[in-house]
Image (cartoon, rainbow, N blue to C red):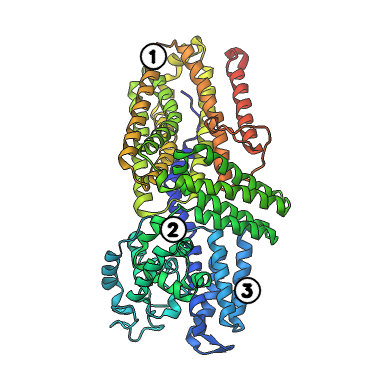
Amino acid sequence: MRLPASLATFVLFVVFCFSAPASVRADTGPAQTAWRLLDYISVDYGGAVADGRVVSAPEYAEMMEFGERIRTYLVALPSTRAQPALIEQAEALQAAIGRKAPESEVAGLAKALASDLLAAYPMPLAPSKVPDLAHGAALYQQQCAACHGATGAGDGQDAKGLTPPPTAFTNESRARQRSVFGLYQVIDQGLDGTAMPSFAHLPSDERWALAFVVGRFAYSDADARGGEQLWHSDPAVRQQIPDLQALTQRTPAALAQAIGDEKARALAAFLRQHPAATMSAASGTMSLARARLTESVSTYVAGNRPKAIDLALSAYLDGFEPVEPILKARDDALRVRIEAAMGDLRAAMSKNEPAETVRERAERLSALFDTAERALSPQEASIGSSFAGAFTILLREGLEALLIVVAMIAFLRKAERADVLPYVHGGWIAALAAGGMTWAAATYLISISGASRELTEGFGSLIAAVVLVSVGLWMHGKAQADAWQRYVHEKLSHALSRKSAWFLFLLAFVVVYREVFETVLFYAAMWSQGSGFAILAGAAAGAATLAVIARALLSYSRRLPIARFFSLSSILIAILAVILAGKGIAALQEAGLLDILPLQGIPRVEMLGIYPTWQGALAQTFTLIFMLAGFWYTGRPAAVRS
């Protein structure tokens, strides 16, 4: 079996599959550090400069140092269209600090840059579940009270002699400028130039719990009681904090601009003590999608097209994609319409269409968001929809991988090489185990971003398509019985060497893990909505259905003559290669790695990998032509080919 020499490519892909989530964190490390320093400058600059004069030389020196570091971190980030503009903003901030600009100007520049940085380099913005604040309070006493004091006043026994002194979390003027996310960033990475260490060794949930605990020190229980009454009595106030992510992002000062200082203080006090209250008002991450959409249109109208495209992409990857699995289970047609509308919006921006056209497409998308929020509401969840979603997701995602693995097993049985079967079985079993590890990582350790998910699916699909093209052409060349008999007698023992057996292991691993990765993320999103028993039942039914299909296909393949088996297998693999080529291009477009050029008159058929874009159509057409040409060439008599 002379399979293609793609072993190195597969190894690289396997490394990519496992490292993608971790690399997201590594790539955004400088962004997180820069954001943390920006947050610090926006809050503490007033302690260094007042009325154009330096009032604290050490703190002013720190501001100057942090301004320079921010620019250095931005330069070190992965290159994007937004990076040059971010560096320009950092230089403007440096200049403002250098000329001792007013506090309001420096804080405004720092906050604007922090917001743009989040849009260009998305980071985990909220905990995956409601933090355990009782545990967080105990952690605070163990880890933080020695410096910051038992009540957060910055008067701990180890605070003496520290320069700068530990932050007093009870200082309300500072607290109203800090978000819970900002506190989390400092806890996560520490603060250079101070005694504040990184607590990255703690699990993410514990770091979030600590952030909420220190964020509530500035507010009294009386404030919290007033906030509770306000929260339950005023729907307009609840709309200001629609979900847990909004709670972690908004500072009390920003909230005060919308509802006033008194209400903002009370609401911050209550929600930082009881973050679970936001869960009842949640509409997933759709609020973020709306905010990014609005920012994108206004930025486009202002003339900054690259940043507008980045914001539109963030609306999809960070706002819509986290709820996509749930919406897919409840109203898949609506999901398809939203994905198409978001692609149309980015395409219009890429082609520099008039602002009015972009506004119209954004309004159409906003109306679809309204419909999606109704579909995503808790009352729309049901045991039946959870079961159906779990069943169809596993069946759909598993079928492509099943067909390829079954073809490999059937081939080895035809070749009477049962000794190589353990490699194939080992490949798909290892993929399932890796899927379990992915689930554990996504649930307890890291946040797998939308971009990481789309890139993994996209590159996995394209690599699998390339390999399937080679395997399909090889199988078609053996479709003639005489060719197969020569192959068996002359080359089989060499072709199915240990090296080729490991190639089969890797092929089985990659095609199965690609589907497992997607399925795990779908199930994790659905599980957070409840109905766990229905989801497990749907998964079990899907697995049983796949097992029945596999048994039927293997039984049927045993009865097929050799030539007929190879002919049908090569056609099946060719079809799968064309499908995966289309899906791979679409995923890379959704991740923002490829532009979108709409193609009119082409239907969207996800099952066949057909998407109405020029890039996808050309990729599938090229793959199909290549396969047909290869079939013609390998189907000719050997004497003619030579």
Circle 3 SS class = helix
Q: Which amino acid does label 3 sit on?
A: Ala
Foreground disc of the pair 2, 1: 2
**Label 3 – label 2 distance at C-alpha:** 34 Å
Circle 3 packing at 10 Å, graded few (<14), some (14-19), many (20+), is some
Is residue 364 in view? yes
Foreground disc of the pair 1, 3: 3
Any mark on residue 92, and which? 3
Q: What residue type is labelled 2?
A: Asp
Q: Residue furthest front?
A: 233
Q: In this view, does 496 lie to the left or right of 360?
A: left
| Residue 345 rendering spot, x and y as whole percentages | 64, 48
Residue 240 sits above or below residue 389 on the image: below
Q: Which amino acid does label 1 sit on?
A: Arg
First along the sequence among labels 3 and 2: 3
Circle 2 packing at 10 Å, graded few (<14), some (14-19), many (20+), is many
Label 3 with label 2: CB-CB less than 8 Å: no
Any mark on residue 243, and which? 2
Q: Name the residue tied to disc 1.
A: 558
| Residue 380 rendering spot, x and y as whole percentages | 42, 43
